[in-house]
Image (cartoon, grey):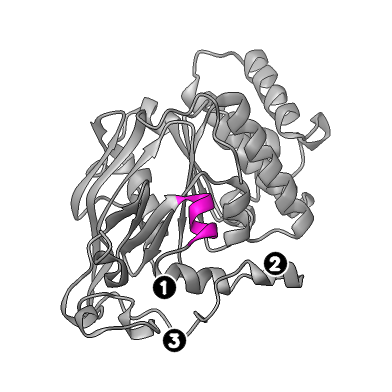
Amino acid sequence: MHEPHEAMLYDQVLLKVEHLKRYFNTPKGTVKAVDDVSFNVIKGETLALVGESGSGKTTTANVILGRYTATDGSVFYKDVEIGSMPLTKRPLWLRREIQVVFQDPATSLNPKKTVKDIIETAIRIHYPKLNKYERMERLLELLDYIGLTEDHLFKLPRELGGGEKQLVALARALATNPTHLILDEPTSSLDVSAQSRILSTLLKIQKDRGLTYILITHDLAVVKNISHRINVMYLGKIVETAPVDDIFGEPLHPYTQMLLSSIPTISEEESKMLPKGVESRGEIPSAIDPPSGCRFRTRCPFVMDVCSKEEPPLKEVVTRHFVACHLHNKNV
């Protein structure tokens, strides 16, 4: 588990999401991609949003980034409401402070631009007073910092390996001197060696600069290595949230248990650490017509009558460990 940065204070909220909803109208009906989600992000931490495809984690991040605006609810960054503010309307300081690293660097990097052009463009936009020599100095410092060399300057993306491309994307994000990085599946398209390099670099950056991360992923092994807290999302809702050790040590929601039981293992010792009796079953329902009551009930091995009638609230079961499940409501 990634230990908290010493500058991380649990009462120092950098980002606050309150009752966020993001709906999409389609010919088949309204897709409730994010449906009343609330959480805080603490300065200096890594908060992971995990869940299957269709859980709402990427849509949540896209509202924070301004790629979508909120249908309802609010997103506050440093006490400024940004959920209703599209990217094109955001001031330069805000776009500078919240940056993103996308899943596939092969598609997020301009194939016709060199590494120098890709990174220098970000520097030029956000620091227009720097001359070309100062821009080059900053660019070379960034390359050296993330583990690339001057030899990479005039290469095109197709001439780079997958890990090198992602390091260039990371350098582009760091070029603005951000406070908050959103990491959208940053290692999913990479081989094991490149994944390790990217994760090590992200940990180094956070330790050195005190950056705050939101990590979006379905890879729970990555979550365990880099995160402080986890929000487990299912069909547009947060169903469990807790520190990473609590999620892996004692997952409370059947969906979280299902996700953990699906982690590939290479030894009997690792297998013994995973939850038993909760296997992956069925597929996530449509967000156009979600199940009544608890949205996970159609896949849950512990379903009860109340699960179809009442939606379980997200409640604190033990200190800093919240779960939305009728199995635990009686203990609260």
Prevailing secondary structure of the magenta residues? helix
Picture quarter with the C terminus: bottom left
**Label 2 – label 1 distance at C-alpha:** 20 Å
* Residue under the image location 31 percent in, 66 percent down: 328
* Residue under the image location 31 percent in, 81 percent down: 297
Vertical arrangement, residue 310 with respect to residue 160, above or below: below
In the image, residue 24 lies in the stretch drawn in magenta: no
Q: Is residue 151 found left or right of 182 in the rendered image? A: right
> Which residue is more in the foreground, 12 or 326?
326
* Residue under the image location 45 percent in, 65 percent down: 51
Callout in the foreground (2, 3)? 2
Q: Determine which residue is flagged by label 3.
A: 282
The answer to whether the residues at label 2 and label 3 have Cβ atoms under 8 Å apart is: no
Q: How many marks overall?
A: 3
Numbered mark located on residue 254 in the image: 1
Question: Quarter of the image holding residue 271?
Answer: bottom right
* Residue under the image location 75 percent in, 60 percent down: 191
Residue most extreme to the front: 331
Q: What kind of element bears circle 1?
A: helix
Q: Position of residue 159 (x, y in %)?
A: 78, 50
Q: Determine which residue is flagged by label 2.
A: 270
**Label 2 – label 3 distance at C-alpha:** 25 Å
Q: Position of residue 22 (x, y in %)?
A: 25, 59
What residue type is disc 2 on? Answer: Glu
Q: Is residue 266 found left or right of 65 in the rendered image? A: right
- Magenta stretch bounds: 243-250
What residue type is disc 1 on? Answer: Pro
Q: What kind of element bears circle 3?
A: loop
Numbered mark located on residue 55 in the image: none
Residue 66 at least partly seen = no
